[in-house]
Amino acid sequence: MRYLITFACYGNHLHGDECGSVRPGHNLPGSRLLEPDSWHVSVERSAMDQAPYALDQHSRMAVLEALHEVCTHRGWSLLAAHVRTNHVHIVVEAEARPERIMNDFKSYASRRLNDLSADPSNRKRWARHGSTRWLWNDQSVREAIRYVAEKQGEPMEVFVGDWR
């Protein structure tokens, strides 16, 4: 199966913020995003016990290396990835459930970031979940790769594999 997986850094993508969010159970293709809601954002922000996390260039490179590492270890194909300051997009082909894939990506990335010793060991780096979209055909894979590689603004740490 092929997936577009996205996860945010801790505290950077709160429900109700300006960039849009979804509620569990309503994250279906074509679903509308929630309207911006400053009250909801303030409630979520007040529940945070650490400051929002951001990835600098060195950290972004380490996360991209970790994505390659987990794919090599698990026998998955990394088709594209873009590690941004506050979120990560990945297009991957794997014979595993997307939730497991996302959890493995976060775990390997956290381990790699721990090796940098730039943060305390209890630092929260990732939002609790993320987005796991199934890519059902070759066209949706091509569109996802283009979205990840070209539609995120100024390129940061980007990988695009040789796919078909």
Image (cartoon, grey):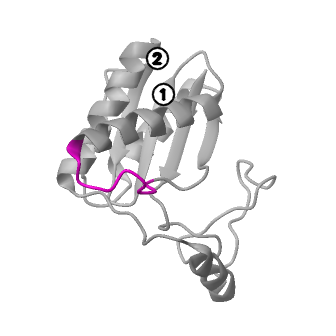
Q: Give the x, y percent position of residue 92.
A: 48, 27
Residue sitting farthest toward the right: 25
Q: Main secondary structure of the magenta part?
A: loop
Residue 51, placed above or below residue 159: below
| Residue at left offset 79%, top offset 55% | 26
Q: Is residue 99 visible?
A: yes
**Residue that appears at 53% across and 40% down:** 5
The disc labelled 2 sits on which kind of residue?
Trp
- Label 2 crowd bin: few (<14), some (14–19), many (20+), radius 10 Å: some
125 horizontally vs 139: left or right? left
- Residue 130 drawn above or below residue 107: below
Residue underneath mark 2: 76
**Amino acid bearing label 1:** Val
Residue 94 in the image: x percent, y percent?
Answer: 54, 19
From the viewer's perspective, is residue 60 above or below residue 49? Answer: above
Question: Which quarter of the image is occupied by the N terminus?
Answer: top right
- Placement of the C terminus among the 4 image quadrants: top left
Q: Which residue is mark 1?
A: 92
What stretch of residues is rendered in magenta?
116-125
Query: Callout 1: few (<14), some (14-19), or many (20+) C-alpha neighbours within 10 Å?
Result: many
Q: Position of residue 151 (x, y in %)?
A: 38, 54
The answer to the question of whether label 1 and label 2 lie on touching residues, with beta carbons closer than 8 A, is: yes
- Whole-angstrom CA distance, mark 1 to mark 2, is 7 Å
- Badge 1 element: strand
Q: Residue furthest front?
A: 121
User: Residue 160: horizontal and vertical position, in percent?
Assistant: 31, 32
